[in-house]
Image (cartoon, coloured by chain):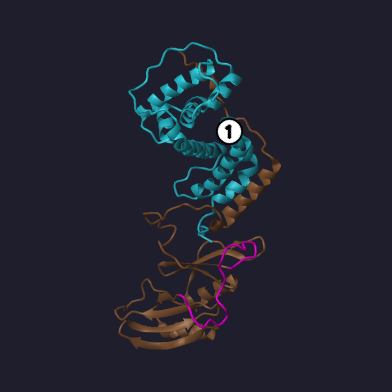
Amino acid sequence: MTDPLDALRAPVEPVDPDPAFALRLRERLRQAVLNPEGGAMTETVAATQDLDWGPALSPYIVVSDARAAMDWYVEVLGAKRRGEMYINEDGTVGHAEVRIGDAVLMFAEASELWPDVPVAPPPATPSTHSHTLHLQVSDVDGMTRRAAERGATVEREPTDQPYGRGSVIVDPFGHRWMLLKPPWRTTDTGTATSST
Amino acid sequence: MSTQPGVRPDPAFGLLELYDEALPHVYGYLLARCGERSLAEDLTAETFLAAVSAVRKPDAPELSIGWLIGVARHKLADHWRRVEREQRGLRVLEGDPDPVEDPWEVKLDAIRARAALAELGAHHRAALTLRYLDGLPVPEVAAHLGRTVHATEALLVRARNAFRRVYTGEEGRP
């Protein structure tokens, strides 16, 4: 017996929607693609780490000048550029990232294109910080000195502590870093080393 | 700002490029199945926005209109499940033994058939649309509806019976 309902088969026939709707949706889509926080992201954290992608947790910071920050992190912290910067339509940097040792640091500039995204770079000379970027390095003294020469504020000069030799700097973009060489570390493997 | 992939191009950008070409297909697919412009617009928007995150998954298939229609089909099935939950209190319980279907030999009139389909409950309409309008095999219908194959076969028999009652005028308009 043939099934009479087979006659209902309906191949996809394109229909042009209301042009106003098409325009509105295009804008929503553009926002969702360029600015995922504004879209409906319902993804859960991947249970397994995608090693090509990067570590499970990476700092994503906002800076006032991402191009200058890129140069600074590469030249002073020995960071390696990772991928291409994403440039917003207004010329601001929507995304940039570097590899430092086995970590990934992501950064971006705030843009007036996304007034609803509540992020902002730190003030030029912040009085307090909500967080510190803790970086293992092989040469605390050398990196602290180079950072100071390149405009960082040295909050705490290198000192020996039970947990290693460390210093605290605030980079020219207002982000606070703790540079530490753990006491047990005798080789340079896996730590950030300056390229200068 | 969540992650824009730095080491490979963001596949979501392909969505923006495909948008103009794909929009009439996705909208046309949904409009023909839900028959209501505003609902078709809502589901079209849901489809494209869901595709942004779906296409970024590591195992996402190649971006294509066919794939977007698949996303639209999921959104349509989700919609009917929501409606079904709302209607559940109103309809007859389905906990009875598997229904029996009489053979039915008829050549359907497409316009009347669409009208009859539109009068069915969401669960019946969903099952018949996926099975017949989209031509999916029963296991895929079951997957979309979140039911077992056996339960879906029984649902399809009930849905066909309900459709037949409406189509042949045994049941008046609600």
- The chain painted cyan is B
Residue appearing at x 43%, y 34% in the figure: B89
- Whether residue A195 is visible here, answered yes or no, is no
Give the quarter of the image for residue A116.
Answer: bottom right
**Would residue A91 appear left or right of A35 to someone viewing this image?**
right
In this rendering, is residue A103 above or below A184?
above
- Whether residue A157 is visible here, answered yes or no, is yes
Q: Amino acid under label 1?
A: Tyr
Q: Position of residue A17 (x, y in %)?
A: 66, 38
Q: Position of residue B32 (x, y in %)?
A: 59, 30
The shade of chain A is: brown
Q: Which residue is most to the right? A: A19
Q: Which residue is mark 1?
A: B29
In reply to whether residue A111 is colored magenta, the answer given is yes
Q: Quadrant of the N terminus of chain B?
A: bottom right
Residue appearing at x 41%, y 87% in the figure: A158
Give the letter of the chain under mark 1.
Answer: B
Indicate the secondary structure of the residue bearing disc 1.
helix
Name the chief secondary structure element in magenta: loop
In this rendering, is residue A59 above or below B128?
below
Q: Which residues are magenta?
A: A109-130
Q: Quadrant of the C terminus of chain B?
A: top right
Q: Position of residue B78 (x, y in %)?
A: 48, 39
Residue appearing at x 57%, y 78% in the figure: A123
**Would residue B157 appear left or right of B23 to someone viewing this image?**
left
